Image (cartoon, rainbow, N blue to C red):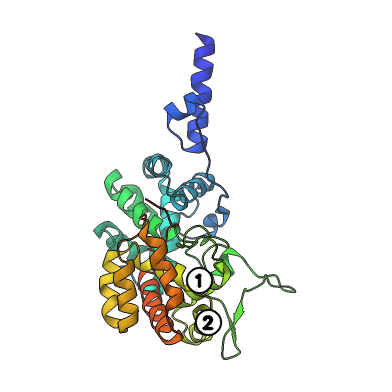
Amino acid sequence: MVKNQRKKARDRKRAETTGASRASAATGKVHRHEPLPEMAWLGELPYAPGRDLDTRLAARLVAACRAACQPCQTSLAERICTEHRPTLAALAGAVYGELAGRGIDAVVSPTTRSWAPLAQAVKGGQGDDGAALAAVEAMSDAAASELLQDALDHWTVGTPLSADLVHPPAEAAPPPGRPRPSAAGTTHSHLEPDTGLLEGMLPYVPGWLIDYDLATRVVSVCWAGCESCQEALVSRVVADRATLAGLAGAIFLTLPRTARRNAPSAGPAARAWIEQAHGTAFTSRAEAALRAVAELNDEDATDLLDASLDGWANSGAAQAGIGLLGD
């Protein structure tokens, strides 16, 4: 009896630590999603003042989302919504407070739309520091889940904070690429996903090498709306068809609403490619669609890139790319 009780206690502790179900913990089939993102800086944000945050739980949830592991995501999200409301407020505030100037996505839930102004007021120093947290703590579990899922749409693709906050540049030797010089010669930073995050997320053709650093940079400047940096990067992406195919595929292979919205603005060749690629994610037709990007001339490739970047810019961090899977 004592032995069984101890085993149950160990299983419960393992489940709480990893986010796995009790059944998985009991059978030893627990898995982890790594690398875990660094989340300690959530405590520096003003959305849960004076409260302890479970940053490890937040890191495990974000990692599970990025790995598209629905069981772990469901388990961990439920814990945050029911047991760790200050952590939820920080995760959501990092999106809807810190990025206040970018507006609110049209597809967010009514809960998020009504809560976001509270986070924005905290960020702007115009409201009660505790109002955003108080609202989160007063939410029903269903409303809290809506807010968390909207925030996780951003976290799935990358850290929604500016590179300078997440990775402060050293005085003598700033990390490579942060801050980046603009085409005009000035130095500034752009919102940028975590290093290496796009690896495994952009659709790719076996044997093609995507320049993930280039993809990350061009996505970040789209989110920032920096036209000078975007123009400086376009020719590099057009010359790198593997990277172009990945960026275009992440938008048009898997996102039918985005494809319909952006296709009318593209030229004939780009529209034809979009029609060919549409709906081919997770099928054997995806590889042929991606390889077809290499057949476009530079003008048509630039047109496709422009349409793809419209999708990235409109979605911000809310749209996640996928890896290429066959039937």
Q: Residue at x 66, y 70 (%)?
A: 169
Q: Counting other residues with Cα less than 10 Å from the Cα at mark 2, is it few (<14), some (14-19), or many (20 or more)?
A: some
The x, y position of residue 151, in whole percent, is 38, 57
What is the three-letter code of the residue carrying label 2? Answer: Leu
The x, y position of residue 43, in whole percent, is 53, 55
Indicate the secondary structure of the residue bearing disc 2. Answer: helix
**Which of the two marks, 2 or 1, is nearer to us in this view?**
1
In the picture, measured across the screen, residue 228 lies left or right of residue 287, that is: right
135 or 28: which is nearer to us?
28
Identify the disc placed on residue 229. none
Residue 227 to residue 279: above or below = below
Residue 44 to residue 21: above or below = below
Residue 232 to residue 5: above or below = below
Q: Counting other residues with Cα less than 10 Å from the Cα at mark 1, is it few (<14), some (14-19), or many (20 or more)?
A: many
Q: Residue at x 49, y 77 (%)?
A: 221
145 or 119: which is nearer to us?
145
The x, y position of residue 122, in whole percent, is 42, 65
Cα separation between marks 2 and 1: 12 Å
- Closer to the chain start, of discs 2 and 1, is 2
Q: Residue at x 48, y 55 (%)?
A: 49
321 or 192: which is nearer to us?
321
Quadrant in the rendering for residue 104:
bottom left
Residue 290 shows up from this direction: yes
What is the three-letter code of the residue carrying label 1? Answer: Thr
Q: Disc 1 marks which residue?
A: 243
Q: Are marks 2 and 1 in contact (CB under 8 Å)?
A: no
In the picture, measured across the screen, residue 162 lies left or right of residue 251, that is: right
The x, y position of residue 230, in whole percent, is 49, 82
In the picture, measured across the screen, residue 180 lies left or right of residue 100, that is: right
Q: Residue at x 32, y 72 (%)?
A: 274
Q: Disc 2 marks which residue?
A: 233
Residue that lies at the very extreme toward the right in this rendered image: 172
